[in-house]
Each structure stands twice: as structure tokens, then as C-alpha cells.
Amino acid sequence: MQVIIKHFSELTTEELFEIYKLRSAVFVVEQNCVYQDIDEADKSAYHLYLKDADGIQAYLRVLPKGARYEEVSIGRVISVKRRCGLATWLLKEAILVAKEKFGAKTLVISSQKYAIPVYEKVGFAQCSGEYMEDGIPHVRMSLDINETLEAEEQEKTNVSMNDIMAEFADCMKNGAAADSEEAQALVKKLQNHISENYYTCTNEILAGLGQMYVLDERFKRNIDKNAEGTAQFICNAIEIFYKNN
């Protein structure tokens, strides 16, 4: 699956034909809604789509301020293959395009009512009551771009931390000692991860964290989800690392 991101002026005739054919099939024919799908806003938009050997599988457009709303907006969201994550994938790409191409801080969409959960999944929140648009119930939704991107980065950081804890558990289960080369390399990896993503983790701070992993029941319980005794194993490995460095 390939992600294509192009301004209207960059689209080939064939690409534009495929996009309009898909939009018409979904928004006019499938939804039995007679309205003007092709509009002037297309000319100022970035058009994003996911394509595989069978053609376009998901599509949307990102519009600059003033094209439809005062804010940067997205619209014409389509996923041919539904309930398999394609819309979420493309929406996340659209958030980046809105920020990078239009300097957007806020992103809005006029969402069909049934699609609200799709947009909530990537951080949109409803900001209006229900209204009718082209005979279909809609609500307006908005998203704080910086807040959403920061949350995504934090999630990636948390996942990485959990991955390191899982590596410690595997190390322990494989019979390695706390002073083994493998365990000590993981301690260094943990220290580097904390320094790069949270705060400067000196050896003294690291030693304190090792104690906290055992003494604070919340941390101990969470770490030991990987395997019973993981928290104590990490604490022991950190103590040895601290003494040797």
C-alpha cells in the first residue's frame, strides 16, 4: 500500500479521473445524494490517497483556511476497504499535511454522524450539535494538532519503555544473571532512553529509579506483568551498574 500526497496542481489527469470517479461512486451514487461534489475548493487542496494494485483504497482532501471554514479542514474522506485501519492511517497523514503545508494548529471536519467514532479515534472531538448537510445528519468536529502529535509521541515513548521492561523479563527468564553482559547492556539502554525522552538520567538518578521499581507497589506491579520478579531483577542489575560506573 502506497501513500500519495499531491496538491491539485500536481495531479495527473488519470489520478484526477480516478479520484472523481471514486468520490462520485460513494458520495453521490452509494449515498443516493445529489449534490455538487467537484468544487472550487479542490483547486487549493492537497489530495491524499492510499493505493495498491487494485487502485485507490482510501482518499481525503486537506483544505487551507478559507476554502470552506476559517480553519484548515479535511473532507471527502473515503475508505473503500472498511474497518481495516485505512481511514485512520490516512487521517494521521492528513494531520501532518495540515501542519506542514498550511501551518495549521487546529483542524476541523464536517463529519457524517455515523462516522464520529472514526474521527474520535485520531483525536477529533465534537464541537457542534447535529445539523443537516445535503440531507444527511452531520456534526462539526475539531482537533488540536500540536496536542494530538505530542500525545502520539508520548505514546511511542511509553511503548518503548514497556518494550525495554519486556526485554529485561526475557533476559531474566533466559537465565541471565543481573551482572551479565546482556543485563548490563539493558540497563544502559534504559538510562539512554530516559535521558533522550524524559530528563537527564545520571547514575544516581538511575539507582534511585531501580529502588523505586521495587519499593513502589504501582511500578512493581506494572513491571512484573512481564514476569514475576522482573522489577527486582532490574533493581539488582541497576545496583551492579551503579557500583561499576
Image (cartoon, rainbow, N blue to C red):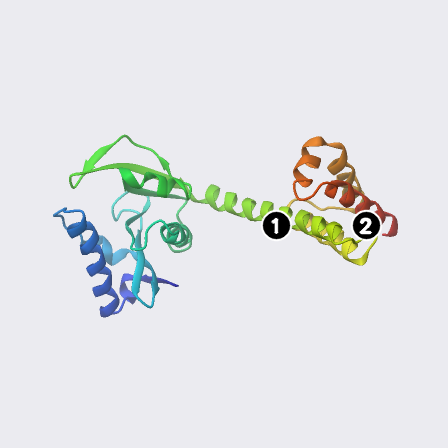
Q: Is residue 70 visible?
A: no
Q: What residue type is disc 1 on?
A: Ser
Element marked by disc 1: helix
Seen from the viewer's position, the closer of residues 119 and 8 is: 119
In space, the residues marked 2 and 1 are separated at their CA atoms by 21 Å
Q: Nearer the viewer, mark 2 or mark 1?
A: 2
Q: Which quadrant would residue 199 be assigned to in this image?
A: top right
Near mark 1 (Cα within 10 A), the count class, few <14, some 14-19 or many ≥20, is some
Using the image, determine if residue 2 lies above or below residue 112: below
Query: Which is nearer the N-term, disc 2 or disc 1?
Result: 1
Total marks shown come to 2
Residue drawn at point x = 79 percent, y = 54 percent: 176
Marking on residue 160 = 1
Residue drawn at point x = 25 percent, y = 49 percent: 67
Marking on residue 178 = 2
Element marked by disc 2: loop
Task: Residue at the far left: name it.
Answer: 34
Using the image, determine if residue 136 lies above or below residue 53: above
Marking on residue 99 = none
* Residue 137 image point, x, y percent: 22, 36
- Considering the image in quadrants, where does the N terminus appear? bottom left
* Residue 128 image point, x, y percent: 30, 32
* Left or right position of 72 against 122: left
Q: What residue type is disc 2 on?
A: Ala
* Left or right position of 151 against 29: right
Using the image, determine if residue 131 lies above or below residue 31: above
* Left or right position of 58 against 22: right
Using the image, determine if residue 3 lies above or below residue 213: below
Seen from the viewer's position, the closer of residues 198 and 171 is: 171
